[in-house]
């Protein structure tokens, strides 16, 4: 935290990119929000949603399956437990989560890349969980470990992303029971930014944390957050043991669980926004509270994943307006709890990195920016309803994240930005191109896209090859990978990690399910 705090606020906000096209823009560890969040509901209506969630928790309840230890926690806390169904008195869970920190630092192996999560901090992280990858050259295919490593490299190389992410794509060429080891190692080896671990089984969560202990030291891990675990509710109103055991493993180790329901309106929740929000709030609140029963004071992130569906076909839809405005409300509810928020991202159901992809992605991403999300998973690469991770969309989304750095910085008002000296120099009817003020500020005045084409039509259609953004993105990711440099890692730590992986893999037969 000290290293991040030493960087001045304007730099953290991403202002001041170089005009030299060959120069790499300066990276920052995270964004400090310079614009306010946007509140869409009144106090009265927020209270109505909280009361509806309280009724769901008290009258319907939530099932906690295949985790007796979680049920024991709830019994000791005073909840009503009948088999696997747990009911909660109004206000009980809000009181329990009050022990969770409102902000915390996730440490990176390079301290300059530590991120703050909560408060006014905003962290962009790649998309998560796709079984397929795609690019314009080879089309859609199952992801491999090399694809996984490529996306880690692309995230590391981007000045606009702050986090290495988690399961950026599923490396299906590695056995299911062993791939978590390769994924965590790849994050550690090919990035020096913060990262996420496995949640697909308790022992895999513990392996992820053990590898973090090798990297940082056991004492450091016990005192600080160095790894995140993204756990999902089985909406509606079911927490299964796979998730709660992993959730508890992270909390037990003082590491942060990201608690996320996945609600498709009309399928796993009501079609109406207010009802889906109340359900999401109830499910997330229960998961956040369970982390505190496992270890009081453990960091936790209040997550949300509202989405819609086509009621004609039953297909999920992403990047639509109703979940986007719903995210605004979730942001208000999270702030009332005093918890860091994970919400929305660059969502799209498009099958190509095209206009639909960017329209839907921007709709969802702006909702994340304005709702006050602190940790924005799915910031880059999300395509095909999250079934596919796209190389081209990854760099297109990262470019958009660069624009959002400047957008989130807001408007600075001081003697320089008011530009009175420029008005006095230029006067009426002239232009500002050669003024001293322009020359003094031109390198930092505007954000520069690395992908957009702003040339005249004749130059674009001639020497520019009449390419669209997807084609330019195709060239860009290849160039980025060709120029990528591995961040140095201590040889002894690398050997210890490899030894740990080899012993773990040798102790179990391959399992492909």
Image: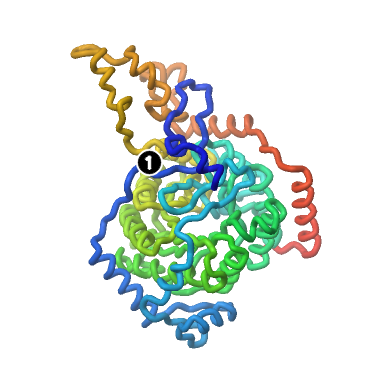
Query: Is residue 167 among what the camera can see?
Result: no
Residue at the spot x=53%, y=24% of the render? 23
The residue wearing badge 1 is 408
Question: How far across and down, in percent of the image, does residue 131 sit?
Answer: 57, 54
Structural crowding at the residue carrying mark 1, measured as other residues with C-alpha within 10 Å and reported as few (<14), some (14–19) or many (≥20)? many
Q: Nearer the viewer, residue 12 or 182?
A: 12
Tell me where residue 309 sits by quadrant: bottom left
State left or right for residue 507 relative to residue 105. right
Residue appearing at x 34%, y 78% in the figure: 55
Q: Quadrant of residue 235?
A: bottom left
Which element type, helix, strand or loop, lies under badge 1?
A: helix
- Comparing 334 with 469, the one in front is 334
The image shows residue 229, relative to residue 383, as above or below, that is below
Q: Residue at x 40, y 71 (%)?
A: 94
Screen quadrant of the C terminus: bottom right
- Looking at the image, residue 214 sits to the left or right of residue 467; the answer is right
Q: Is residue 336 visible?
A: yes
Measured as percent of width and height from the top left, residue 278 is found at: 34, 69
Q: How are the residues colored?
A: rainbow
Depicted 412 relative to depicted 325: above or below: above
| Residue 311 at x, y percent in the picture | 34, 62
From this viewpoint, which residue is outermost toward the bottom? 82
Numbered marks: total: 1
Looking at the picture, how far across and down is residue 120, in whole percent? 41, 49
The part of the image, by quadrant, that contains residue 219 is bottom right
């Amino acid at each position: 935290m000290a290293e991040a705090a030493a960087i001045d606020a304007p730099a953290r906000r991403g202002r001041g990119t170089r005009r030299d096209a060959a120069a790499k823009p300066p990276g920052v560890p995270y964004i400090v929000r310079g614009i306010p969040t946007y509140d869409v509901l009144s106090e009265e209506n927020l209270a109505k949603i909280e009361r509806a969630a309280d009724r769901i928790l008290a009258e319907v309840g939530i099932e906690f399956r295949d985790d007796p230890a979680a049920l024991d926690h709830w019994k000791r806390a005073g909840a009503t437990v009948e088999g696997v169904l747990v009911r909660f008195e109004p206000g009980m869970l809000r009181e329990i989560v009050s022990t969770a920190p409102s902000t915390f630092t996730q440490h990176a192996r390079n301290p300059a890349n530590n991120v703050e999560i909560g408060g006014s901090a905003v962290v962009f992280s790649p998309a998560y969980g796709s079984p397929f990858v795609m690019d314009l050259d080879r089309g859609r295919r199952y992801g491999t470990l090399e694809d996984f490593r490529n996306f880690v490299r692309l995230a590391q190389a981007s000045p606009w992303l702050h986090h290495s992410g988690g399961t950026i794509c599923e490396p299906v060429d590695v056995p299911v029971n062993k791939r978590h080891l390769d994924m965590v190692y790849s994050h550690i080896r090919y990035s020096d930014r913060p990262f996420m671990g496995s949640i697909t089984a308790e022992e895999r969560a513990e392996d992820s944390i053990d590898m973090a202990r090798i990297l940082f030291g056991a004492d450091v891990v016990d005192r600080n957050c160095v790894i995140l675990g993204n756990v999902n509710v089985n909406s509606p109103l079911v927490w299964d043991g796979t998730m709660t055991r992993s959730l508890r493993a992270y909390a037990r180790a003082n590491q942060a669980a990201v608690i996320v329901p996945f609600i498709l309106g009309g399928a796993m929740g009501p079609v109406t926004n207010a009802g889906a929000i109340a359900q999401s709030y109830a499910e997330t609140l229960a998961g956040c509270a369970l982390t505190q029963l496992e270890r009081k004071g453990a960091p936790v992130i209040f997550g949300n994943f509202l989405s819609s569906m086509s009621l004609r076909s039953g297909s999920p839809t992403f990047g639509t307006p109703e979940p986007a405005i719903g995210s605004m409300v979730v942001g208000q509810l999270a702030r009332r709890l005093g918890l860091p928020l994970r919400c929305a991202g660059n969502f799209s159901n498009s099958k190509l990195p095209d206009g639909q992809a960017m329209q839907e992605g921007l709709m969802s991403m702006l909702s994340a920016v304005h709702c006050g999300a602190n940790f924005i998973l799915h910031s880059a690469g999300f395509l095909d309803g999250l079934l596919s991770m796209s190389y081209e969309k990854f760099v297109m989304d990262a470019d958009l994240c660069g624009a959002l750095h400047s957008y989130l910085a807001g408007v600075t008002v001081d003697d320089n930005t008011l530009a009175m000296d420029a008005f006095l120099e230029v006067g009426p009817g002239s232009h500002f191109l050669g003024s001293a003020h322009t020359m003094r500020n031109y390198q930092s005045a505007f954000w520069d896209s690395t992908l957009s084409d702003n040339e005249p039509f004749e130059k674009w259609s001639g020497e520019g090859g009449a390419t669209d953004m997807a084609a330019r993105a195709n060239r860009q990711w290849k160039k980025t990978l060709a120029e990528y440099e591995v961040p140095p890692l201590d040889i002894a730590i690398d050997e210890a990690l490899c030894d740990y992986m080899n012993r773990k893999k040798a102790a179990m037969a391959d399992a492909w399910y």
